[in-house]
Image (tube, rainbow, N blue to C red):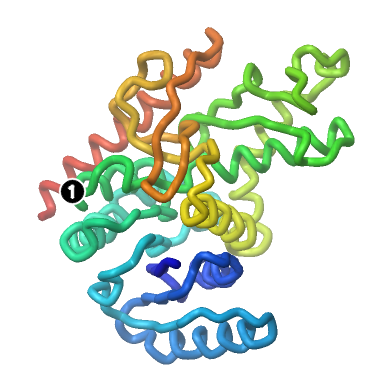
């Protein structure tokens, strides 16, 4: 059984993630952490969640706090805290603003919870994962971000709809930045175990339209309803279940790679990783030529932004 802590629990994603995680049978304790001044809101969230537990028959010890020190014995600490993206704003515009908070949080977690897994949701997630890794002092396997996991699921859904098959029959993934330079791996996409390029109808697949839809999906949701909530919340729940269930599934998350993807690395970015109770372990893979070029561009972009953010952080401290 495990204790899961959610930082930024008073935000939309944090609140819904708490609900999805509460359905995982391996969770015995959940701590909701918010900023000082939000004590009443946190108490209300706990009462509301407790009512849902009673209706569902869930037995989880639920508590709230405005102090990160209370996360001390957590198995997984989920960081959703940060300034949310506004309509029309690029994820990377948030970088330095959120990096200051992430660095401070990661330092505290590294000192108080050295055995925990630190799961980053805050955008831009690839850069924030790198910041959290550096300032926490934790091992690379312990620090990871949501990355392109949700992007991969969005593409999977679009492909299933196009071919009129159950979504479970589609296996695909997107690697690279959780953002504009994301790279779809068509070479690794299958339907019912058949490589998608071997299907005659693949020639009519609106590839660019699908990728554009995935790339702008978050922005479209923010424009229409103000925030992305259910997709990220369910994606977070899936990854927490995978970890606590020690499932060894391969999912695409933001993780530090040395040179696992065609010799490209030294960056935190979305890659396939084997995930279990010990953390995340990037899987070495080879790509097609066009995928290598796209991934290289994505890595170069994230490396540049990460370096700029790290430099500004050092200057501000």
Q: Residue at x 64, y 61 (%)?
A: 230
Above or below residue 315? Residue 69 is below
Q: Secondary structure at mark 1?
A: loop
Residue 76 lies in quadrant: bottom left
Q: Quadrant of the N terminus?
A: bottom left
**Residue most toward the top?**
289
Mark 1 surroundings within 10 Å by alpha-carbon count, few (fewer than 14), some (14 through 19), many (20 or more): some
Residue 110 lies in quadrant: bottom left
Residue 251 horizontal/vertical position (percent)? 54, 39
Q: Residue at x 30, y 58 (%)?
A: 116
Above or below residue 132? Residue 298 is above
Q: Residue at x 29, y 69 (%)?
A: 73
Q: In the image, 92: left or right of 19?
A: left
What residue is shown with label 1?
Answer: 137
Tag count: 1
Foreground of the two, 2 or 317: 2
Residue 38 horizontal/vertical position (percent)? 38, 85
Query: Is residue 79 something one can see in this rendering?
Result: no
Q: Quadrant of the C terminus?
A: bottom left
Residue 289 horizontal/vertical position (percent)? 53, 8
Query: Is residue 10 something one can see in this rendering?
Result: yes
Q: In the image, 191: left or right of 133?
A: right
Above or below residue 12? Residue 224 is above
Q: In the image, 9: left or right of 264?
A: right
Residue 167 horizontal/vertical position (percent)? 78, 41
Q: Residue at x 34, y 45 (%)?
A: 129
Residue 187 lies in quadrant: top right
């Amino acid at each position: 059984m495990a204790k899961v802590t959610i930082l930024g629990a008073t935000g939309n994603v944090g609140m819904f993630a708490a609900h999805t995680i509460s359905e995982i049978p391996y969770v015995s304790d959940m701590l909701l952490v918010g900023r000082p001044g939000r004590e009443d809101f946190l108490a209300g969230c706990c009462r509301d969640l407790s009512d849902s537990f009673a209706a569902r028959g869930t037995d989880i010890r639920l508590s709230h706090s405005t102090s990160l020190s209370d996360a001390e014995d957590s198995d997984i600490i989920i960081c959703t805290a940060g300034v949310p993206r506004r309509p029309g704003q690029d994820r990377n515009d948030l970088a330095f603003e959120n990096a200051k908070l992430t660095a401070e949080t990661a330092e505290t977690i590294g000192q108080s919870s050295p055995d925990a897994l630190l799961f980053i949701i805050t955008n831009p997630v690839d850069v924030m994962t790198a910041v959290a890794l550096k300032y926490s002092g934790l091992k690379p396997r312990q620090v990871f971000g949501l990355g392109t996991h949700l992007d991969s699921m969005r593409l999977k859904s679009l492909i299933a709809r196009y071919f009129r098959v159950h979504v479970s029959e589609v296996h695909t993934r997107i690697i690279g930045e959780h953002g504009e330079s994301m790279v779809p791996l068509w070479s690794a996409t299958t339907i019912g175990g058949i490589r998608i390029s071997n299907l005659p109808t693949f020639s009519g697949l609106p590839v660019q339209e699908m990728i554009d839809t995935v790339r702008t999906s978050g922005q479209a949701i923010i424009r229409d309803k103000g925030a992305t909530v259910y997709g990220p919340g369910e994606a977070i729940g899936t990854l927490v279940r995978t970890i606590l269930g020690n499932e060894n599934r391969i999912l695409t998350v933001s993780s530090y790679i040395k040179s696992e993807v065609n010799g490209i690395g030294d960056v935190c970015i979305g890659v396939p990783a084997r995930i279990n109770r010990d953390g995340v372990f990037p899987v070495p893979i080879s790509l097609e030529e066009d995928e290598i070029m796209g991934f290289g561009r994505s890595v170069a972009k994230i490396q540049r932004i990460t370096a700029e953010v790290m430099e500004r952080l050092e200057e501000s401290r």
